[in-house]
Image: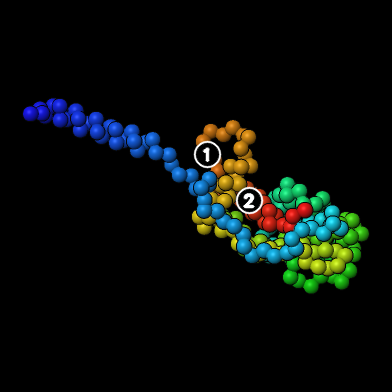
Amino acid sequence: MMCWKNTGSLLLGIVCLAFAGCESVPRVDHARTGPFYIPTNVRGVDRFPATVRRIAILPVAGLPEIPEENLARLDSSFSSEFNRSARAEAVLVSRDLLARLAGARQLTSVEALPHDLLSRMKGSTSADALLFIDLTAYSPYPPLKLGIRSKLVDIASGEILWAFDNLFDANEPAVANAARRHYLDSNASEFVKGDLSSTVLQNPTRFGSYVAFSTFVTLPKR
């Protein structure tokens, strides 16, 4: 017959083993396992024409209530991620230059353009194509949100080579997972104490870099 003292020790051992087993189970990190957001509303040519070697990137065209300094940060994020895409040489068109050429500090891809804008842009930048980037939705406070409509236009022919229209909402788990994965991949060589990838979901500049990367990864291949 087992004494109560031994029974208590046995139960204590079982509880300890149970907790040890629970602690040994790794936590699932959805920034590595997904699901991940994949932009779907994309169309364009399969590959860049051989004649398109240099692309002029217009300033991000935002909604009227967005301060220009916020747009300037997005300009930087999108130009940096375009350069990382290695699709073509890029030249960032400043808002001042655009104002001189078009009479406006921003232009959307859906508005009527000055009749000679493409030729004037060619003369000023020596670009072969023009990249429009429009904000269709914007929230700089959590949950962060960016709606991007973008078009790449061949200056010589006026043909739309690529078009993109997607909404990135950090409130959606697949978008949050993809944004965190991009942050982890982009900072893999840095030593950080703990996982700081969740900061991308609170920082508009970091979130903008993720959105720009996800936009330009869909560009035609070389």
Q: Is residue 10 above or below residue 101?
A: above
Q: Position of residue 122 (x, y in %)?
A: 89, 60
* Residue at image coords 58%, 50%: 179
**Residue to which mark 1 is pinned:** 195
Q: Position of residue 199 (x, y in %)?
A: 55, 45
Position of 15 compared to 160: left or right?
left
* Residue type indicated by callout 2: Tyr
For residue 138, say whether it is visible. Answer: no
Q: Position of residue 84 (x, y in %)?
A: 73, 47
Q: Quadrant of residue 61?
A: bottom right
Sooner in the amino-acid sequence: mark 1 or mark 2: 1
* Residue at image coords 52%, 58%: 172
* Residue at image coords 77%, 58%: 47
**Residue to which mark 2 is pinned:** 210
- In front: 88, or 136? 88
* Residue type indicated by callout 1: Asp
| Quarter of the figure that contains the N terminus | top left
